[in-house]
Image (cartoon, rainbow, N blue to C red):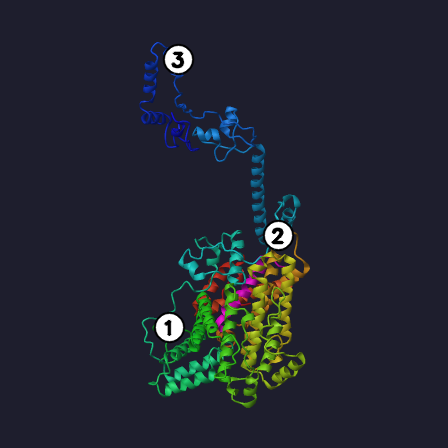
């Protein structure tokens, strides 16, 4: 056979030249099919050439034929390896054969289609049992710590000794050690599914600064130490839902059907409008007073000439807020007036007509959204109020209202109206964030809008006021004077006012006479009150960012305590600089600004409680490293005293007309529940303030219960708050709420 005919074998062919897809037998048969006469012709040729020669010799003399490779059988060598495995499977160990140690199945079990099982050795089993025991010990220690505030002092001291013993404290990782150093951490995670039900959707996230979260923790601690005669009750609701007194789970405040082009008589409307500007406008100047009153008079002088649907929506929201206040005051409604829900429904129909929410924002739309948020807050729909406030802020930002305006086409009065709208919206946002425990919508770093001028709106046309409004340099100095004192540095120590003030160089020597001149010419009025209210708002914003934000979770307790002390000092500095006429801790008989003084007092004490609450919680829960420091204990005591100061703002005799007439009525339930929760937490946690102060704390809790009970008679918002708080107070001590009308 010619060598050229020999086939070149591929590395993928087997010994017979078969490809990987051919079997050895088929390869042999294939070769014979290609050479059918080769063997037969060779034998015949050998016999014919020499008949006498043996066949074998004849064949030997012939040219050699092509070799036929015999196919190899399957490789049946047993797997062998000198590698030693740390653990053999149960089957190989039982049969005393070498195991490959492969996971999840060794080679023998895999080839034999046998379930391969690896069981722990003695050391692994001991380590696993030890970990389980340590975990169980940790659970018991946590249980002891949770019961610690509810026990008498002798048992509490004994538990402290047991829990603080080094032998019972498990070794921890650095992350766990950080948690032990700072057990009062902000919420940087959630354990609730806020899409689980309609109730959880209505409540939404309620973070650490919210008194609802404080009530929830108190509920959990008290629920572990149930008193059978006053059980808290078991339900499918989580503690957060069972202590949430907001009314967002109720239906939308609509009163369909409603004719949105109806309006009350001029006399009734005038009373409601006057009431709104008298009790609300100073704290939330969402609308320009002069322009609105001018449009109001034009509208009733010629009702057929409608000023536009947007203004009508603003008008109805003003009526809704004023009517809500009138109903709380238990005043008889004027003839021809509707309910606050009917006015709100008309405003909603007007501003939502033709999908107005999807239109590009304008100034009146921002006012509508802001007033809606305030109305929602006043009726207890706090989650809805927070969402609507966010919509309003985004509309305002889209229009650039948060920035200083240098447009020559806008009048100075119009600019001033926009500045007031922005800062009123900013103030409302911070208040709602403190109530819900959620992050604010806008950082002050992005705001360059001038602060409102410290002059009455009625005086805007006077020469000295108009000159001040047009003086950008003086207004920058005013911005620096009021805001930087309250909000100088952020958490990293950066100057937050470098950007707003960089547009022109301002020397300190130049600021002093300008600000002094402003202070001397501006008499006490609603605008000056709003400036101090706004400065206090910035202090509250700093407390939310630096104490209760998730980013502070990495701080040790010493670092957090230092931050708390700094924010508390900022609040005290604000109080020290407060003018005497607004100073609520100094007696001032026959003061014409009682409403403003009371509003600043509630806001100031509320911010102090947000700042100091972590110290109270730490003082109650003894830390892993030992008892809290003397400074922390003093701050916890101060927190209880501040809560008592809020209750002392209320009259000894319950009078809801005085309460809603002179207090910030739109959030008074929040203020009372916030301080009352702190007082109850201190009582349950057995914070020792001395015999006299302890007795005063009990009286203050009773007084708060009496006020909430009286308020609950005509207000669903107060009724739910009273039900939640009275149940918790009665669980601790039935005498706190029995009789329910007692305030002494």
Q: Mark 3 or mark 1, which is nearer the start of the sequence?
A: 3
Instruction: Answer left or right for 523 relative to 307.
Output: right
Callout 1 secondary element? helix
Quarter of the image containing the C terminus? Answer: bottom right
Magenta stretch, residue numbers:
665-690
- Judged from the image, the secondary structure of the residue bearing numbered disc 2 is helix
What is the spatial separation of the Cα atoms under label 1 and label 3, in whole angstroms?
112 Å
The N terminus - image quarter: top left
Camera-nearest residue between 216 and 607: 607
Residue 516 magenta-drawn?
no
Residue located 35% across and 87% down the image: 302
| Quarter location, residue 126 | top right
User: Which of labels 2 and 1 is toward the front?
Assistant: 1
Residue 70 in the image: state x and y as whole percent: 41, 23
- Among all residues in the image, which is located at the extreme front? 49
Residue 532 image point, x, y percent:
58, 76
Residue carrying label 1: 356
* Figure quadrant of residue 683: bottom right
What's the mark number on residue 157? none
Which residue matches tag 3? Answer: 57
C-beta proximity under 8 Å, tags 2 and 3? no
> Would you say the magenta stretch is mainly helix, strand or loop?
helix
* Front position in the image: 41 or 427: 41
Q: Choose the circle earlier in sequence order: 2 or 3.
A: 3
Q: Which residue is mark 2?
A: 180
Seen in the picture, residue 431 relative to 285 is either above or below; the reply is: above
């Amino acid at each position: 056979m010619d060598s050229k005919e020999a086939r070149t074998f591929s590395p993928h062919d087997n010994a017979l030249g078969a490809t990987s897809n051919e079997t050895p037998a088929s390869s042999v048969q294939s070769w014979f099919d290609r050479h059918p006469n080769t063997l037969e012709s060779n034998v015949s040729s050998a016999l014919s050439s020499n008949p006498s020669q043996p066949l074998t010799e004849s064949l030997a003399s012939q040219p050699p034929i092509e070799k036929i490779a015999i196919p190899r059988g399957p490789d049946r060598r047993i797997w062998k390896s000198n590698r030693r495995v740390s653990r053999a499977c149960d089957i190989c160990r039982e049969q005393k054969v070498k195991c490959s140690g492969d996971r999840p199945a060794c080679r023998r079990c895999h080839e034999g289609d046998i379930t391969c099982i690896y069981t722990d050795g003695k050391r692994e089993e001991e380590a696993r049992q030890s970990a389980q025991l340590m975990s169980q010990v940790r659970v018991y220690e946590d249980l002891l710590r949770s019961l610690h505030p509810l026990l008498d002092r002798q048992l509490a001291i004994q538990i402290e000794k047991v829990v603080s013993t080094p032998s019972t404290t498990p070794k921890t990782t650095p992350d766990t050690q950080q948690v032990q150093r700072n057990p009062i951490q902000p919420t940087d995670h959630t354990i609730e599914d806020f899409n689980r039900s309609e109730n959880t959707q209505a409540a939404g996230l309620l973070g650490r600064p919210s008194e609802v979260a404080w009530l929830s923790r108190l509920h959990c601690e008290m629920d572990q130490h149930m008193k059978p005669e006053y059980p808290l009750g078991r339900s499918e609701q989580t503690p957060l839902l069972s202590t949430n007194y907001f009314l967002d789970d109720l239906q939308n405040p609509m009163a369909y059907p409603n004719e949105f082009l109806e309006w009350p008589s001029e006399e009734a409307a005038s009373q409601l409008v006057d009431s709104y500007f008298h009790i609300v406008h100073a704290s939330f100047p969402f609308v320009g007073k002069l322009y609105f009153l001018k449009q109001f008079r034009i509208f009733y002088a010629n009702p057929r000439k409608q000023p536009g649907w947007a203004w009508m929506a603003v008008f109805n929201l003003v009526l809704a807020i004023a009517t809500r206040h009138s109903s709380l005051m238990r005043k008889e409604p004027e003839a021809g007036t509707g309910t606050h829900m009917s006015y709100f429904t008309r405003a909603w129909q007007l501003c939502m007509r033709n999908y107005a929410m999807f239109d590009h924002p304008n100034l009146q739309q921002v006012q509508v959204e802001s007033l809606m948020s305030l109305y929602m807050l006043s009726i207890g729909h706090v989650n809805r109020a927070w969402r609507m406030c966010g919509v309003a802020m985004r509309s305002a930002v889209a229009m650039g209202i948060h920035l200083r305006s240098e447009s020559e086409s806008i009048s100075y009065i119009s600019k001033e109206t926009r500045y007031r709208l922005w800062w009123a919206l900013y103030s409302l946002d911070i208040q709602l964030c403190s109530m819900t425990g959620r992050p604010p919508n806008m950082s002050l770093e992005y705001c360059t809008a001038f602060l409102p001028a410290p002059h009455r709106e009625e005086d805007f046309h006077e020469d000295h006021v108009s000159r001040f409004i047009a003086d950008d340099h003086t207004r920058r100095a005013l911005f620096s004077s009021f805001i930087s004192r309250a909000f100088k540095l952020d958490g990293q120590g950066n100057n937050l006012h470098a950007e707003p003030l960089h547009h022109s160089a301002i020397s300190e020597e130049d600021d002093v006479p300008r600000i002094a001149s402003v202070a001397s010419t501006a008499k006490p009025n609603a605008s000056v009150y709003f400036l101090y209210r706004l400065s206090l708002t910035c202090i509250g914003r700093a407390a939310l960012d630096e104490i209760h934000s998730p980013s502070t979770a990495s701080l040790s307790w010493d670092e957090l305590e230092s931050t708390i002390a700094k924010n508390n000092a900022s609040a005290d500095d604000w109080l020290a600089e407060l003018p005497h006429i607004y100073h609520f801790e100094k007696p001032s008989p026959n003061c014409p600004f009682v409403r403003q003084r009371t509003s600043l007092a509630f806001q100031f004490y509320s911010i102090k409680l947000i700042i100091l609450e972590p110290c109270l919680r730490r003082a109650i829960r003894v830390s892993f490293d030992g008892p809290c420091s003397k400074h922390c204990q003093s701050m916890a005591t101060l927190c209880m005293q501040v809560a008592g100061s809020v209750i002392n703002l209320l009259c000894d005799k319950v009078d809801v007309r005085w309460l809603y007439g002179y207090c910030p009525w739109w959030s008074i339930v929040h203020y009372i529940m916030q301080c009352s929760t702190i007082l109850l937490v201190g009582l349950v946690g057995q914070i020792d303030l001395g015999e006299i102060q302890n007795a005063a704390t009990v009286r203050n809790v009773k007084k708060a219960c009496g006020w909430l009970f009286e308020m609950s008679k005509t207000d669903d918002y107060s009724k739910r708050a009273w039900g939640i708080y009275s149940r918790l107070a009665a669980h601790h001590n039935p005498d706190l709420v029995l009789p329910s009308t007692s305030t002494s």
